[in-house]
């Protein structure tokens, strides 16, 4: 079934880009789970990488996960994590 992009999708995208791109790679959920998004060198990702990484989970989650499992399963990356050069890791940030 074809699904159209709605306002909630856009708001989620902006939320993730803003928090993960500007705030230690963490949304509120990631902060609670004690995980964060980092680049391949373990550094902050910035807004551009956050936008690419967040696009998949906001608008194409099933494809993002399935292709990621098939193509990047050994690295435990979603498709858009691989495209943005990011990883989700256990957070080293004190809470």
Image (cartoon, grey):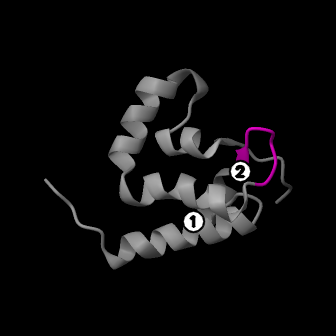
User: Is residue 19 left or right of 42 when viewed as pictured?
Assistant: left
Magenta part of the chain = 37-44
Q: Which mark is residue 47?
A: none
Q: Quadrant of residue 45?
A: bottom right
Above or below residue 92? Residue 22 is below
Above or below residue 76? Residue 52 is below
> What's the magenta bit mostly, secondary-structure-wise?
loop
The earlier-in-sequence mark between 1 and 2 is: 1
Q: Which residue is under mark 1?
A: 16
What residue lies at 50% left-to-right and 24% top-to-bottom?
Answer: 73
Looking at the rendered structure, the secondary structure element under dot 1 is helix
Contact (Cβ within 8 Å) of mark 1 with mark 2: no
Q: Which residue is under mark 2?
A: 34
Residue extending farthest to the left is: 1
User: Is residue 3 left or right of 18 when viewed as pictured?
Assistant: left
Image position, residue 94 (x, y; %): 86, 56
What residue lies at 55% left-to-right and 55% top-to-bottom?
Answer: 52
What residue lies at 56% left-to-right and 52% top-to-bottom?
Answer: 53
Looking at the rendered structure, the secondary structure element under dot 2 is loop
Image position, residue 18 (x, y; %): 64, 71
């Amino acid at each position: 079934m074809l699904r159209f992009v709605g306002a909630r999708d856009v708001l989620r995208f902006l939320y993730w880009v803003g928090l993960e791109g500007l705030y230690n790679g963490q949304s509120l959920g990631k902060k609670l789970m004690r995980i964060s998004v980092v680049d391949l060198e373990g550094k902050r990702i910035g807004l551009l990488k956050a936008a690419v990484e967040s696009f998949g989970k906001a608008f194409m989650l099933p494809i993002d996960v399935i292709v990621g499992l098939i193509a990047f399963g050994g690295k435990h990356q979603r498709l858009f994590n691989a495209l943005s050069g990011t990883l989700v890791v256990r957070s080293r940030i004190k809470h």
